[in-house]
Image: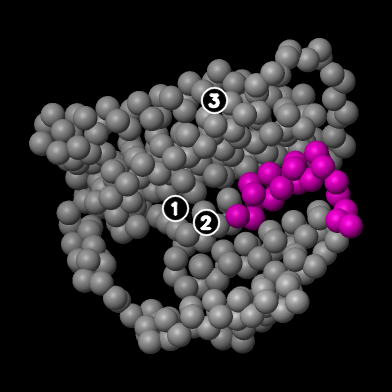
Amino acid sequence: MIFVFLLVLLMLIAAIAASIFKDLISAVIAAALVSLIAAILFYLLQAPDVAMAEAAIGAALVTVVFIIAIRRTKRFEE
Amino acid sequence: MRRIISILLLGIIALGITLSLAKIPFGTPKTKVGRYYIDKGVEETGATNIVTSVVVNYRAFDTLGEVTVLFIAAIGLGAVLTTGRRKKPERKIEPASLVLYTGCRFLFPLILLFGAYIFVHGHLTPGGGFQGGAIVASAFVLTYLGCRERRISERGSKLAESLGGLIFVIVGLVGLAVGGYFLMNFLPKGIPNFLFSAGIIPILYIVIGVKVGSELAGIIDNLIEESE
């Protein structure tokens, strides 16, 4: 149970970090961490199908798409 | 002032969601149809993974719609990104480091195999066409990081995509011809827990896996081409 609370806490911290980071690459990595922890939580809630989709799409492919977009634009937010 | 208003609005939304969800006890079944799937799913469809029996058997028509949405999204992205692109001369691509290159060459077939395993065993174990397809696409993403001179052939991915959609619809139409309704499970259900069981479910999930994998890989490919 404590493990789950720690995960949720880490997820919240990562979500807040993703919204306040000025370096957009770091923000994207923090957002990927949110997805990854969401996947672990889905697994703990006995939904392995959703967990797999979340890990593969939310944490991997969306991150790649964001990073490609940042490479085309600016890395730092003013 | 604007900040205060937006915080206030967010607070109201959070309050509304909390109040509306507070009365629902967590984890208890809310509908009768879920119980039915759990009790009768294996018997009726032959798939031991009940999520799969819902996605590709009871709700297969919805899945066809989902696949179509993804297909349209991929087509739209391709159309937006490739307009006015001229054939660029061969650029010198900076090679990846030795560690990345070797790791990519070693891991690429393994990830591809894992993705294929996920969607071939969709009716037995967790996962299925969408998850397996996403894993296959992530294997191609690794190729773009590590082995940069390699590209998936655009024709190959388009062919896999179109064949996938075509086979899905043809299987559905055969069901319509044989049993009277679209996407009917006309093949023998076999013994649950065996690879060759559950009738058309493995076939549909394999074509969904191939289709989703090639679509997502195609989307990433389009974006990377555009960004170079």
Region rendered in magenta:
A58-78
Residue B112 x %, y % = 57, 38
Mark 3 and mark 2, same subunit? no
Residue A66's place in the image compared with B181, above or below, is below
Residue B215 x %, y % = 53, 34
The local crowd at label 2, few if under 14, some if 14 to 19, many if 20 or more residues have their Cα within 10 Å, is many
Mark 1–mark 2 CB contact (< 8 Å): yes
- Name the residue tied to disc 3: B157
The residue lying at 55 percent from left, 57 percent from top is A54
Q: Say which amino acid is labelled 2.
A: Met
Q: Chain of mark 2?
A: A
Left or right of A68 in this view: B59: left
Residue A49's place in the image compared with B137, above or below, is below
**Label 1: element kind:** loop
Name the foreground residue: B117 vs B128.
B128
**Residue A19 lies in quadrant:** bottom right
- Name the residue tied to disc 2: A52
Mark 1 and mark 2, same subunit? no
The residue lying at 77 percent from left, 36 percent from top is B146
- Name the residue tied to disc 1: B127
Mark 3–mark 2 CB contact (< 8 Å): no
Q: Say which amino acid is labelled 3.
A: Ser
Left or right of B150 in this view: B178: left
